[in-house]
Image: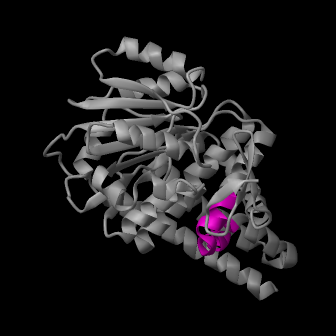
Amino acid sequence: MTLVLLALVAGSLVYCVLAVIAAEHYGAARAPEPEGQPPISILKPLAGVDLGLDENLRSFFQQSYPRYEVLLAVRSADDPAVAVVERLRSQFPAVPSRLIVTGEPPYPNAKVFSLHCMFAAARYDLLVMADSDVRVTPALLSTLAAEFQDEKTGLVTCPYRAVPGPSFWSRLEAIGLNTEFLAGVLVARLLDGMQFALGPTIAARRQTLADLGGFHALKDYLAEDFVMGKLAAELGWRVILSSYAIEHHIGSQPFGANLKHRMRWNRSTRRSRPWGYVGQVFTNPLPLAIIFIAAVPAWWPVLVVAAAFRGLAGWAAAGRVLHDPLTLRNWWLVPVQDCTSFVLWLAGFFGNTILWRGRKYRVLRDGRFRAA
């Protein structure tokens, strides 16, 4: 057992080295110089009023780009997000925009149904799909357009810097996203290339989406972003990680809601890519080192080494790539987050039900989900 634990710790240290190399590899890539500015349709699925919704949506109406439209979708006309949308539309009359009321979704993934409805109404062939909790600078569309100059590029997915609300649990989750999660994305990119996409902001060609069967092909999946990127790559389209990092404002959930949210994410990941989920054991060197020295106290220097490697890997992602002030200010929370993440990772191996927007679902073996 001691040798197994030591092997796991050693593997996690190798992973940390890979994370540093992957961050440097990503940082060395340069966005191409823009040669054209094709028109773009922005698709924004909405459901209720998230913390900072006005500022998030406003940032998409303020793009420094010559020709784009903003489409927004709600399930019903009495959604409280409608008032925010109409106020912004009146403030930015020069930006073509449209609010679509979709009605009740005919399948489990309501976000996918909203995207399907907006896709049908969109005027342009380059589409940017962005969640309601995303905030950007005016340079987003220009950067994405430049990255689509290669005709083989079918999908571009944006890394994100998580910005928490005032709650402690929100801050803890944001630190995990900015250090642990992003490091995993960068390592996957380094080893296998981009065979997946990240949900908050994805840009795609209309033809790419048509080739994978449209949004109908994604309607039953909980992790529709991951599946979208996977299918696009399998069809031969180039999938890239954008040079533009968005801000992902994750809200301010209390402990219970945050726990359910993170468990939903873990169970979805386990079903979407089971071996990748098992491999996440190596992304948490500190908990592994703590368990190891609990078994072999004389080897306490292992914990010091693990902490140093984890610090370098975490800062390579949060500092080198995201320029994240949160992690710099709250570095002492990284061990707390890592131990929390490790426990939730273990818990993610058990159970197949999730709670999403007040409804209970069962996640199936292939990553699809059904009402429970």
- The picture places residue 223, in percent across and down from the top left corner, at 57, 56
Single out the residue that lies furthest toward the left: 35
- The picture places residue 137, in percent across and down from the top left corner, at 37, 32
Q: Residue at x 36, y 52 (%)?
A: 242
**Is residue 11 shown left or right of residue 188?**
right
Q: Is residue 58 above or below residue 202?
A: above
Q: Residue at x 64, y 69 (%)?
A: 277
Q: Nearer the viewer, residue 172 or 70?
A: 70
Residue 272 is one of the magenta-drawn residues: yes
**What colouring does the structure picture have?**
one colour
Q: Is residue 126 above or below residue 50?
A: below
Q: Nearer the viewer, residue 149 or 327?
A: 149
**Which image quarter: residue 67?**
top left
Q: Residue at x 62, y 49 (%)?
A: 108
Q: Is residue 130 visible?
A: no
Q: Residue at x 39, y 71 (%)?
A: 234
Q: Is residue 34 above or below residue 24?
A: above
Q: Is residue 263 visible?
A: yes
Position of the N terminus by quadrant: bottom right
- The picture places residue 270, in percent across and down from the top left corner, at 66, 66
- The picture places residue 126, in percent across and down from the top left corner, at 28, 45
What's the magenta bit mostly, secondary-structure-wise? helix
**Is residue 71 shown left or right of residue 199?**
left
Residue 215 is one of the magenta-drawn residues: no
Q: Nearer the viewer, residue 208 or 348?
A: 208
Q: Where are the magenta residues, as a range?
A: 266-285
